[in-house]
Image (cartoon, helix red, strand yellow):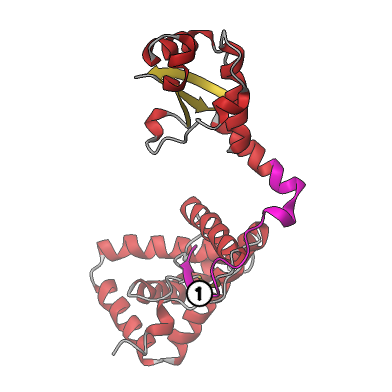
Amino acid sequence: MEEYKKKVAEMIVKSLDSETSVEDILIKIEEPKDKKNGDLAYPCFNLAKTLKKSPVIIAEELEKKIKLNDLISSVKAVNGYLNFYINSKNIVGDVLQNILNKPNENLIKNVGNNENIIIEYSSPNIAKPFHLGHFRNTVLGNSLYRIYKELGYNVTGINHLGDWGRQFGLIIEGYKRYSKDYDMENEPLKSISDIYVKMTKLSKEDESIIEIARQNFKKLEQGDKEAVEIWKFIREISLKEYMKVYDLLHAKFDSYNGEAFYSDKLR
């Protein structure tokens, strides 16, 4: 911000009809606590004696004289203060360019002091295709994961999968009934998703399917071999598809333990 203060001081000096130096202006430039009052502010009270005018008039006259540039988006005179609003796009560009030019000097190290941070992100429901909401969540979570690691925190990234629940009783029944009618080899996840949609529709037409689904999930909870094998297959093909996206995004996780992992720990 010091660089911006100097540029603002130079702008003020160019607009003054006096021999005030850049240094005299620079030492008085402030950073307002309330951003409504600009990013930088100069109190014109310091010029009142020299210019023999009230600070309010000085500020208003300077507001009209100061020429805006790419750095400053606007200048406002308020109660004897000149409030400068910096073009935020330029600040972001300058900061990023500075980091790129001197990466080793700009990185902040070890502020986390190895403290623990857990970040849960992505966390899709298996048996369903990866959608835009999960994409956004994955990008944000993985960015935070990397940032905290760089700052010296001990970070654990968790992909808490939605891989348990009564819906799997319905999916298991649908798989047993209709898997042969779908392209399970080339489009396994889409096929499972379509089967689930079909079974949901059928369950609304035939209430007995709901009871069958309950029994299937009960079997899954009790470790029934067939139910567990179908569930594992669904989980595996889901993760296989998700990994294609994660690899593209360079997203990594320390744990993929979802709801199913805790099913025997609920008590």
The amino acid on which the numbered mark 1 sits, given as a three-letter code, is Glu
Magenta highlight on residue 164: no
Work out whether residue 215 or residue 206 is closer to the camera in this orientation and state it: 215
Name the secondary structure under disc 1.
loop
Q: Is residue 76 left or right of residue 187?
A: left
- Percent of width and height locating residue 117: 48, 71
Work out whether residue 139 or residue 76 is closer to the camera in this orientation and state it: 76
**Is residue 120 depicted above or below 47 in this figure?**
below
Tell me how many marks there are: 1
Magenta highlight on residue 115: yes
**Is residue 45 depicted above or below 241 in this figure?**
above
Query: Which residue position is annotated with label 1?
Result: 115
Which span of residues is magenta-colored?
Answer: 97-121
Q: Is residue 112 left or right of residue 76?
A: right
Q: Is residue 127 visible?
A: no
Q: Is residue 256 left or right of residue 10?
A: left
Residue visible at 57% across and 26% down in the picture: 24
Please identify the residue farthest to the right as the structure is shown.
101
Label 1 environment density (alpha carbons within 10 Å; few <14, some 14–19, many ≥20)? few
- Percent of width and height locating residue 221: 36, 87
Image-quadrant location for residue 258 = bottom left
**Is residue 138 depicted above or below 79 in this figure?**
below
Q: Is residue 263 left or right of residue 145?
A: left
